[in-house]
Image: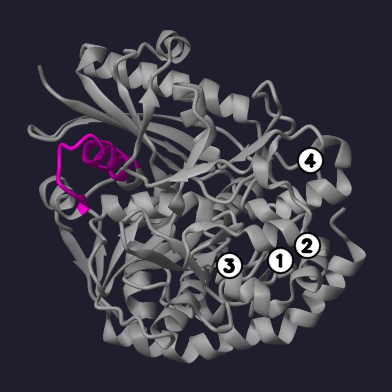
Amino acid sequence: MAKYYMGIDLGTSSVRSFLIEFDQKQSYVAGENYDVIIPQLGYAEQDPQLWYEKTVRVVRSVLAQSGIDPREIVAISFSGQMHGLVALDRNCEPVMNVPLWLDQRSADELPEIYEILGEERARDCLQNRIGTGFLLSSLYWTKKRRPEIYARIDRVLLPKDYIKFRLCGRAVTDYSDAAGSLAFDNVHMTWSDPVIAALGLRREIFPECLPSTEVVGHVTAEAARDMGLCEDTLVVNGGSDQCMQAIGNAVVEDGVFACNIGTSSLITTAARRPLYDPQLRTNTFAHALPGCWSVMAACLNGGSVLKWLTQKIFRGESYEEINRMVEQRPCGSNGLFFLPYMAGERTPHMDPRARGVYFGLNLDHGRADMARALMEGIVFGLKDGLNVLEEIGIPCKRIVAAGGGARSDVWLQIQADIFEKEVYRSASKEQACLGAAITAAVGVGSYADYNAACAACVESSRQIFTPKEENVRVYRQMYPIFRELYASNKHNFEAISGVFQVK
């Protein structure tokens, strides 16, 4: 009987199920999309029940595609969007929609959180700056602004853990996702009791935390009926999407960086010690890889901004049409700049009130220039993060591009030209799902460790984008202007937020 492994990736815009038999490289994938709910300015949330319903559909779809006997699936593991607050009551029912990583409702609570904790204790206990959209800040907001809902909370989970809970009946998380809650001490690898106590939060609602490769149970009878799975199938803990994408790209060696442009965007690498930026412009989280930490420059804006342009400003052109449009325009978009901070920004500004800006428009500019400037703006923002990572002592030897943005040749060339580094296109189109499937295989002992699994299961990058000297010269002149645009407008972003305040 063949041995298959399943990876389920719960993203911000879709859930995907990936089924693979590693020896023969037989794989199948299915996905279902969903939207972010924005009930008012600054809010961004999703319904966890919808997540589960969509997961049922993609698992059934991938089983139908493959035609395999569900008993051939040895184990299932998970990848998931980070930071979101899943709050359940005593009956294990959600008490509210899930505030996501891009939710900004807790912006006014941040000064209060820092006043309670103090900058030094927050830094020493968490190794990260507390921002909006993290489980910790969303939970504190709920305690303060919605006490009747907070009183009903019996346990909290991260997004992918809710799907795992529905599959195996066990409420548990892993170190990489727990770290992304900002209620976790990355040095001592445990929930940060001093922070939780100081903010008056209930320690007992935080889940058990185990390694990503831990077997946490079997598929329950109910989940087996819903999804068409076998109750003997093992469930392996899983990890955050950024760690799973790194594993799916074999970004497990020193000096190899991943640049992911998905709904958001980031530059990340694995470090052998818990390095963090003294100015807390980056994030340092426990990694799924044992003895490693994920050091990342996370930007809140990526493919979501391109989606905004195509759906709300343009005429709904496909991404292929956008790429063809952009390829026809010159490097630098004829002097048009775009600040991509449509959802606020994390690295390097840590500013939830930052906003998007087109700057330098003239009467010759058209839609193609706007699209190209947007792509360039996203990458300029990522260059800010890359510079910070190298500044704190993590040299970048090469970059592997991942996420939906890696499907665009023109966007990859823009990355190579602005980063001034070779950019390798990932050979896998399902990096996070593949990372989760590899985690399932390592968890049940099919491979000794992640290094052995990645060597056997991850294809090498097939295409390299090299910086073009003439483009590099243009971007070197544009980059300082891009940076100055944020500095010059920071006070205006504050003023706008004062008029149109998030409630």
Please state the horizontal and vertical placement of residue 131, each as a whole percent of the image: 67, 64
Name above or below for residue 439 compared with residue 345: above
Report the magenta residues as a range: 433-450
Helix, strand or loop for disc 1: loop
Neighbourhood count class around disc 3 (C-alpha, 10 Å): few under 14, some 14–19, many 20 upward: many
Label 4 is placed on what type of residue?
Pro
Q: Name the residue under label 4.
A: 39
Label 3 is placed on what type of residue?
Leu
Please state the horizontal and vertical placement of residue 178, each as a whole percent of the image: 52, 51
Which circle, 3 or 2, is nearer the viewer? 3
Neighbourhood count class around disc 1 (C-alpha, 10 Å): few under 14, some 14–19, many 20 upward: many
Q: Are marks 2 and 1 in contact (CB under 8 Å)?
A: yes
Q: Name the residue under label 3.
A: 126
Horizontally, is 25 left or right of 471 in the view? left
Residue that extends furthest to the right in the rendered view of this protein? 499
Q: Disc 4 to disc 2, how far (Cα)?
A: 17 Å
Q: Are marks 3 and 2 in contact (CB under 8 Å)?
A: no
Front residue of this view, candidates 440 and 190? 190
Which circle, 3 or 1, is nearer the viewer? 3
Neighbourhood count class around disc 4 (C-alpha, 10 Å): few under 14, some 14–19, many 20 upward: few
